């Protein structure tokens, strides 16, 4: 590379590039090795996973995007700074190349040793973890990483963008409706309209309208795809309950696999702030909570497979065998169902048409960017609707929250209802329901009706957020374990009453055990559960302990 005569170190404006103290470097160095570096040496490359965390001891290292082609220098780091981001711990490929801009020396700490340090050294671990999370957020916000090229009106474009956002894959979207050069580029590449959207990785790999699984495979290492299909504990669902069970199960020595249809964190990941979680007096975002949990879990040896949708359960061979939608079969000595819930929809004319462009069922940064400075409507009177309204108010022109109840406190936590009502950016419309949607290719307005007086009014809206409850994701379990009339999983004494079983030892089934011995349920999917993040995490931890007891009694 051609380096300028004076290479200025990138300032640390957001806490993403902290400098380690001498003592912290020494503690990291106990499990690492010093390496000399020459000018233009490459420490790790875009599109691959680094085996080491590098700490700059002397000299400077540049983080370069599109190395060898555009050679864009994104950041420069000097002595006592460390390189890399969250991909080191989550098993995804990197999005930048680390190139030595000056001769010097680095400390190379193997990733396995880094996980051990994070687990035993709270000071160093928290510093690194916090920096990794901020760096990933910065990369995502800047549009670094893969490119998604497709029309804003394409359902597949939206699917891929949502998948990238939910899995925190740094990316940039190029809208074919606005960028005629992108259209010319696709024609030159021989890409037919029906093959869009396309995903471009590292300026060399082109995926034509890939499935979520194909995209996941393209950005992951080969190693995670050669995963084991036999384990002590299989967890279906990577929300708070599943993550907690994974951490505690693996900590107790159980070989553990976690599968999920979408992304790690579940519905909780969409929450901008979780208020009541133990240990976080000022709250914590769902994304940060999920990132911390997956770091713990991978450090303990938990293996994740995403996306992988559970399609069937069979216990006829002794083990609990789960078949995924792509045909993979996983044999587990114990199974935890933590699949959470699916969102309810409004049954309105044109709903399906507008779902492709303007209707959302979660409020994350993806959706916030989609409707920045637009008027939006949020439908729902529960906690998820209140949290979404508060989050979106910081990005939209204004927010109207439509609740069919006459008082927000009927279904919303008191503290959250107070925040919503006090926020000047949010207009609350009680006793109100949506009756019609109108617009061209995108939503323009909704017709809202007062369910007491019958009066109707037109409300301007470029986006509609529907947060009106959900149903459990348990169709794959039908006929295999007992469910209540709404499809939630029955556990403990209720499962026994629903499906009496002979030969059970005293105290069985356990409180979180289903009608099938060795199959447990935790979190929102469980009948009678408290629909809160803290409760789900607690149930996951408890389920891991009960799994241990079950496995001990079975030997």
Image: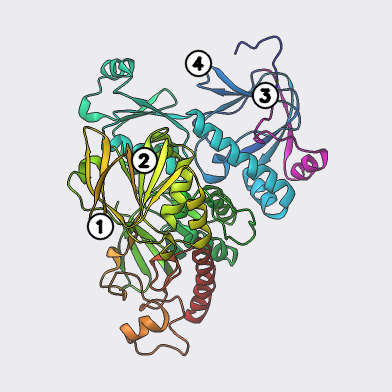
Cα separation, mark 3 vs mark 4, equals 19 Å
Closest to the camera, between mark 4 and mark 2, is 2
Cα separation, mark 4 vs mark 1, equals 63 Å
What residue sits 71% from the left and 35% below the top?
18
The disc placed on residue 284 is none
* Residue 237: quadrant of the picture: bottom left
The answer to whether any part of residue 554 appears in the image is: yes
Tag 4, which secondary structure?
Answer: loop
Residue picked out by circle 1: 453
Judged left or right of residue 240, residue 477 is left
Residue picked out by circle 2: 376
The answer to whether any part of residue 266 appears in the image is: no
Q: Is mark 3 in CB contact (under 8 Å) with mark 4?
A: no
Q: Of 51 and 241, which appears nearest the observer?
A: 241
Q: Is mark 2 in CB contact (under 8 Å) with mark 1?
A: no
What residue sits 47% from the left and 51% below the top?
387
When the figure is inspected, residue 345 is found, relative to residue 77, above or below; the finding is: below
Mark 2 or mark 3: which comes first in sequence? Answer: 3
Mark 3 or mark 4: which comes first in sequence? Answer: 3
Tag 3, which secondary structure?
Answer: loop
Closest to the camera, between mark 3 and mark 4, is 3
The stretch of residues the image draws in magenta is: 11-39
């Amino acid at each position: 590379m051609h380096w300028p005569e004076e290479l200025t170190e990138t300032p640390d404006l957001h806490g993403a590039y902290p400098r380690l103290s001498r003592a912290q470097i020494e503690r990291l160095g106990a499990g690492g090795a010093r390496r000399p570096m020459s000018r233009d040496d490459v420490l790790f490359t875009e599109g691959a996973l680094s085996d080491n965390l590098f700490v700059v001891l002397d000299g400077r290292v540049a983080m370069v995007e599109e190395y060898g082609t555009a050679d864009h220098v994104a950041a420069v780091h000097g002595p006592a700074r460390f390189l890399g981001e969250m991909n080191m711990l989550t098993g995804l490929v990197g999005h930048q190349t680390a190139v030595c801009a000056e001769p010097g020396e680095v400390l190379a700490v193997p990733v396995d040793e880094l996980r051990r340090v994070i687990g035993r050294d709270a000071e160093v671990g928290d510093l690194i973890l916090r920096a990794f999370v901020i760096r990933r957020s910065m990369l995502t916000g800047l549009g670094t990483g893969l490119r998604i090229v497709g029309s804003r009106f394409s359902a597949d474009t939206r699917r891929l963008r949502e998948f990238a956002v939910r899995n925190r894959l740094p990316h940039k979207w190029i809208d074919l409706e606005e960028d005629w050069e992108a259209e010319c580029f696709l024609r030159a590449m021989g890409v037919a309209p029906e093959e869009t959207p396309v995903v471009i990785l590292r300026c060399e790999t082109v995926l034509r309208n890939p499935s979520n699984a194909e995209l996941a495979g393209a950005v992951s290492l080969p190693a995670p795809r050669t995963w084991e299909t036999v384990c002590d504990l299989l967890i279906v669902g990577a929300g708070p309950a599943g993550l907690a069970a994974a951490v505690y199960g693996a900590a107790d020595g159980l070989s553990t696999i976690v599968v999920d249809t979408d992304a790690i964190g579940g519905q909780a990941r969409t929450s901008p702030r979780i208020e009541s979680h133990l240990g976080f007096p000022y709250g914590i975002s769902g994304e940060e909570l999920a990132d911390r949990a997956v770091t713990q879990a991978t450090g303990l040896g938990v293996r994740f497979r995403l996306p992988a949708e559970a399609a069937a359960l069979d216990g006829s061979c002794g083990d609990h065998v789960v078949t995924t939608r792509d045909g993979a079969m996983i044999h587990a000595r114990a199974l935890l169902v933590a699949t959470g819930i699916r969102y309810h929809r409004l049954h309105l004319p044109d709903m399906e048409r507008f779902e492709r462009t303007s209707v959302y069922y979660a409020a994350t940064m993806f959706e916030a960017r989609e409707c920045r400075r637009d008027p939006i409507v949020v439908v729902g009177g529960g906690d998820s609707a209140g949290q979404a309204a508060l989050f979106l108010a910081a990005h939209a022109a204004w927010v109207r929250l439509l609740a069919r109840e006459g008082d927000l406190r009927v279904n919303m936590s008191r503290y959250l209802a107070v925040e919503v009502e006090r926020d000047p950016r949010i207009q609350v419309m009680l006793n109100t329901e949506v009756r019609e949607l109108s617009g061209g290719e995108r939503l323009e307005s909704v017709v809202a009706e007062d369910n007491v007086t019958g009066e109707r009014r037109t409300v301007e809206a470029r986006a509609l957020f529907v947060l009106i409850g959900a149903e459990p994701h348990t169709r794959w379990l039908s006929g295999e374990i007992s469910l209540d009339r709404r499809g939630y999983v029955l556990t403990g004494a209720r499962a026994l009453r629903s499906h009496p079983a002979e030969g059970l030892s005293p105290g069985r089934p356990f409180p979180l055990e289903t009608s099938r011995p060795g199959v447990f349920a935790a979190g929102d999917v469980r009948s009678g559960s408290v629909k809160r993040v803290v409760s789900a995490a607690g149930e996951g931890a408890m389920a891991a302990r009960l799994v241990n007891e079950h496995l001990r009694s079975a030997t």
